Amino acid sequence: MKKLVLASFIGAFALYSCGSDSNNAQDNIPQNIDSTSVENDETTTEESMSYLLPSPLQIAELFKNSGLTYIGDLTSSTKNVENYNTKYAQKLNFGVYSADMAYCIINNQTQSAIDYLSTLRRLSEKMWMTDVFNTMGLSKRLESNVNNHDSLVTIMADLQIQLDNYLDENGMGYTGPIIFAGAWVETMYLGAQVNQTNSNEKLVYRLTEQAVVLENLLKALEQINEDQEFDELIADLTVINKNVDFLKEDEDAVLNKEQIDNLSQQIIDLRTKIIKN
């Protein structure tokens, strides 16, 4: 049996999962950040495992606890939102902006988080997902909890749950992995960029750890790619995956500096491709 080593993403916030049921967001606040192993046995099929994808906020929190400092000009410009006119670009960059919002929230940059929330709302209108935002009063909640980190985390978790429910209820479950792909690339980009200026062992470990998440993401994308709509994205992510594939054979392995630099450049190139549409 193959063990998939995941950080305690699983069971923390809402997961981008097929037909997942979401409860109160307060129940989804992560209680610890230890490593957890999930074994692929008779009760856990490969198909279900492929959808174990964390929320953008989960990954950002893990990186934050490992030394991900705030650098304001790293995030994607909100001005780019008007350039995303295809559903594919909108979904990917919805994920990018979700990761940027999470990055701002965990670093107590509330006004920037509100700006990204507004940008996500504009994208949701293009994607016919306005109801996700209209029913939550997110902007007012963010503004009234400027100095309360735990409340900001809960608000982001609420958004994650509402989005997950909306996609499921409207037969759009296939959209979740695309959004997550954008969020994953953006968070890895932020982590890689910060690591280049302020490298530390914990942050390198978190970058290494994401190899398992990438494997699950690729499975999720392949399962929804019946019309080959996502061939290019899968190909780009597969290139990255090949360079970290050896990590899945040894759970104690960590990328060295050359490998981190190579991974970082590949992530930067893919992220540039996504935000430039």
Image (spheres, grey):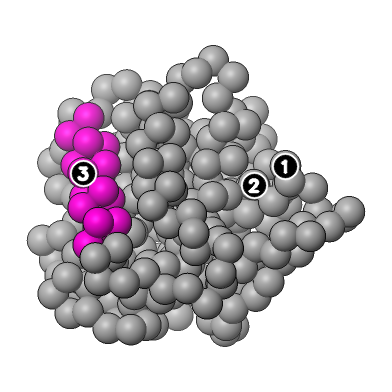
Residue 90 lies in quadrant = top left
Question: Residue 77, which numbered label?
Answer: none
Residue topped by disc 3: 269
Image position of 195 with respect to 259: above or below: below
| Marks 1 & 3, CB-CB < 8 Å contact | no
The answer to which of 126 and 198 lies nearer the viewer is 198
Q: Is-magenta flag for residue 265?
A: yes
Farthest residue toward the right? Answer: 42
Along the polypeptide, which appears first: circle 3 or circle 2?
2
Q: How many labels does the image show?
A: 3
Residue designated by label 1: 47
Q: Where is residue 160 in the image (x, y as percent from the top left)?
A: 51, 54
- Please give the name of the residue rendered at 22% of the width and 79% of the height, measured from the top-left corner: 199
- SS for tag 3? helix
* Part of the protein shown in magenta: 261-277
Q: What is the C-alpha distance between the residues marked 1 and 3?
A: 30 Å
| Amino acid on which the number 3 mark rests in the picture | Asp
Residue 214: within the magenta? no
Q: Distance between the residues labelled 1 and 2?
A: 5 Å
| Mark 3 Cα-neighbour bin, 10 Å: few <14, some 14–19, many ≥20 | few
Separation (CA) of disc 3 from disc 2:
25 Å
